[in-house]
Amino acid sequence: MKQHKSNQHGPKERQVLRHREGTALMIKEYFNHIHTGLETILKEEAEKIKEAAQTIAQTVANKGLIYVFGCGHSHMIAEEIFYRAGGLAPVNPIFTESLMLHEGAVRSSTLEKMAGYGEHVLNEHRLSSADILIVVSTSGRNPVPIDVAITAQKAGCFVVALTSFHYTKLQSRHQSGKHLSDYADLAINNHVVLGDAVMEHERVTVPFAPVSTIYNMVLINSIVAQAIAYIAENGDQPPIFLSGNLDHSEEHNLQLITAYKDKIPLLK
């Protein structure tokens, strides 16, 4: 008689299978967290997203600029919509390298907590009442993003904050005792939990897997998408970059670069 191979796995094989199953469950759970979080943002923040989009549409119509600022990982939100295929051309990102990670992660975190540094950062730019500034800070409790917002408002600039209202439970590090949401003309809640990380594991002592960048990226792109629709519905052609990887996109993009490069030095 033929001997059938046993379907039973040995101890080592069973351990590998359990490991693979656990990994797959982590992947699915993280995706579920992202999906649930984005659904919450859409449900709770849709009206504010539309208000931000309307302000951007008016800014573009008035020949103003869309400034975006964030410290640490939040600077990626500014990078996301600048010179972006499918994005608006009049975006002027505020890139302060000392507040990013590549010149020293710990140093950047320390500088973000420094009183007055945000005012110094913004004074290097010429914001006006024709412009809009989007400040991204999930915690909204550190001095630099708050001082950036305050300085922009003094210049008459409309300020939008992408932040988590959960952090208003924690004490602000700003001398005023207030949070970023208190100094924004429009504060949009990204609903990020305290600590950012959303995953747990029985063998891991701290939460892991952050969500703030994903939530903020979706928020900023949804605002821009709605703004583009408003611009078009107002009868104007939105100034949108084409992907440089498409044939014959150079002439289209060059026209936009020529139109905005004097106002946006990083386009040169």
Image (spheres, helix red, strand yellow):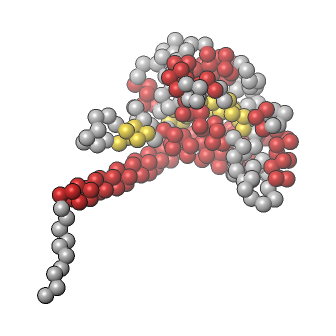
Is residue 167 left or right of 64 when viewed as pictured?
A: left
Quadrant housing residue 28 = bottom left
**Residue at image point 72% right, 34% down:** 92
Asked if 61 appears above or below 120 in the picture, the reply is below
Residue 111 percent coordinates (x, y): 55, 18
Is residue 203 left or right of 188 when viewed as pictured?
A: left
Asked if 129 appears above or below 35 in the picture, the reply is above
Residue 107 percent coordinates (x, y): 53, 20
Q: Which quadrant would the N terminus be assigned to in this image?
A: bottom left
Asked if 264 appears above or below 29 in the picture, the reply is above
Q: Is residue 237 visible?
A: yes
Q: Is residue 181 visible?
A: no
Residue 69 percent coordinates (x, y): 63, 30
Q: Which quadrant would the C terminus be assigned to in this image?
A: top right
Q: Nearer the viewer, residue 159 or 31?
A: 31
**Residue at image point 75% right, 39% down:** 90
Quadrant housing residue 186 = top right
Residue 205 percent coordinates (x, y): 28, 34
Residue, far bottom = 1
Give the number of marks: 0
**Residue at image point 21% right, 57% down:** 12
**Residue at image point 74% right, 24% down:** 125
